[in-house]
Image: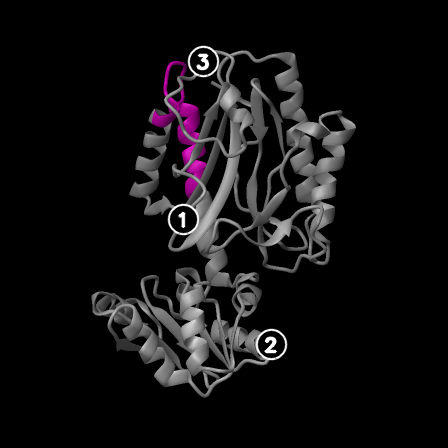
């Protein structure tokens, strides 16, 4: 935790700030070890304070590491307590709430809104974070094994999701709370699979379906993300061809991952192969993204990104082919950037026929 705080202050200094204030639970957790409703404060001497409403104070004291915990009334009380401690400091905050920022600026002239110190620190994972991500990925692999045993013709997408989430929660793995979906998982059979971010429905699996199972779940705060595509019975020659293309594309993408490589070159390694096979128009999203305390973090593995990979970044590589009203295919792994990337998912990428 001390090293994290040193990193946070180092990046704060780069934008001429000596104090960090976080309102976001992910950044609060990263800074303090506590995930909850509170404000986190990191001062230039390393002193770390949590300002929390009374209902959160007990847990904040129990879960945080080397923090002072101050009780304050919800709302304006929290803000008043914060201002009293930092009104003379050069402050950077991740606050995205306009009224709160305007209130803070009245009392703290040297305050700026920026997420850069937080994301610049979080983008490189420490050994503790890597071990948590590896464990999360192992649980997801077990869930893919469960898919191969429990998935069947006539079963609803929602029924399979229930089976998988029951197992996940038994392993202390939970929904990410990702705002852009109403479901914890993506379970998409047949034509639903052509929607990369399909919602889970009551549709029943049919013979000949390809089924996309995208399992994105949180373990001890950290998100692992992986996808496999299964088949129920015999599929068309086009679907089989497309699957093998995605499989090879993902293999090429993983092979390209190493420190110093531009993110856009990982995207190109996957995309070029799919385009060469005349399926380029059906690969409709970027190749991957960073993972950590959020589902989608930096870096972005996109043709637009000039960011260079660094050792111990955590990313996904997930090419796909989506043919409207027919099927979708995606193969995705979470991995840690190394000279030889640490691919955290071991479940087979051969086509599993059920």
Of the two numbered discs 1 and 2 on the same chain, state the one appearing first in sequence: 2
Say the numbered circle drawn on residue 218: 1
Say the numbered circle drawn on residue 206: 3
Tag 2 residue:
15
Q: How is the image coloured?
A: one colour
Query: Would you call the spot at circle 1 few (<14 residues within 10 Å), some (14-19), or many (20 or more)?
Result: many
Left or right: residue 113 compared with residue 99: right
Say the numbered circle drawn on residue 280: none
Query: Would you call the spot at circle 2 few (<14 residues within 10 Å), some (14-19), or many (20 or more)?
Result: some
Q: Quadrant of the N terminus?
A: bottom left
Q: Residue 155's x, y, as percent?
A: 37, 18
In the foreground, 242 or 118: 118
Q: Residue 192's x, y, as percent?
A: 50, 23
The residue sitting at 37% across, 55% down in the picture is 220
Residue 66 visible, this angle: no
In the foreground, 16 or 139: 16
Part of the protein shown in magenta = 139-158
User: Of the residues tagged 3 and 2, which is closer to the observer?
Assistant: 2
Q: Report the residue that reaches farthest toward the bottom.
A: 88
Of the two numbered discs 1 and 3 on the same chain, state the one appearing first in sequence: 3
In space, the residues marked 3 and 2 are separated at their CA atoms by 56 Å
In space, the residues marked 1 and 2 are separated at their CA atoms by 31 Å
Left or right: residue 295 compared with residue 278: left
Q: Residue 331's x, y, as percent?
A: 58, 34
Q: Is residue 143 inside the magenta stretch?
A: yes
Question: Is the residue 40 above or below the residue 189 in the image?
Answer: below
């Amino acid at each position: 935790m001390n090293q994290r705080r040193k990193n946070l202050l180092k990046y704060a200094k780069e934008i001429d700030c000596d104090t960090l204030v976080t309102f976001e639970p992910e950044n609060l957790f990263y800074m303090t070890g506590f995930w909850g409703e509170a404000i986190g404060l990191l001062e230039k001497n390393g002193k770390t304070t949590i300002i929390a409403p009374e209902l959160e104070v007990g847990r904040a004291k129990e879960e945080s590491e080397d923090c002072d915990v101050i009780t304050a009334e919800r709302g304006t009380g929290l803000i008043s307590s914060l201002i009293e401690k930092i009104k003379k400091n050069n402050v950077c905050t991740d606050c995205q709430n306009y009224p709160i920022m305007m209130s803070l600026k009245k009392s703290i002239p040297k305050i700026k809104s920026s997420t850069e110190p937080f994301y610049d620190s979080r983008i490189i994972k420490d050994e503790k974070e890597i071990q948590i991500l590896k464990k999360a990925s192992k649980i997801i692999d077990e869930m893919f094994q469960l898919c191969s045993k429990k998935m069947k013709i006539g079963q609803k997408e929602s029924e399979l999701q229930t089976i998988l989430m029951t197992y996940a929660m038994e392993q202390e793995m939970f929904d990410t709370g990702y705002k852009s979906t109403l479901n914890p998982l993506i379970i998409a059979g047949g034509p639903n699979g052509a929607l990369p971010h399909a919602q889970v429905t009551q549709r029943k699996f049919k013979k000949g379906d390809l089924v996309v199972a995208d399992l994105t779940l949180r373990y001890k705060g950290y998100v692992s993300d992986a996808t496999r595509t299964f088949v129920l019975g015999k599929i068309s020659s086009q679907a089989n061809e497309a699957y093998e293309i995605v499989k090879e594309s993902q293999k090429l993408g993983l092979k390209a991952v190493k420190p110093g490589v531009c993110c856009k070159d990982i995207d190109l390694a996957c995309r070029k192969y799919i385009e060469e096979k005349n399926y380029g128009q059906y690969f409709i999203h970027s190749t991957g993204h960073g993972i950590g305390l959020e589902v989608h973090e930096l870096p972005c593995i996109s043709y637009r990104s000039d960011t260079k990979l660094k050792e111990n970044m955590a990313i996904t590589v997930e090419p796909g082919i989506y043919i409207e009203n027919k099927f979708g295919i995606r193969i995705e792994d979470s991995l840690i950037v190394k000279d030889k990337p640490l691919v955290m998912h071991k479940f087979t990428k051969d086509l599993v026929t059920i």
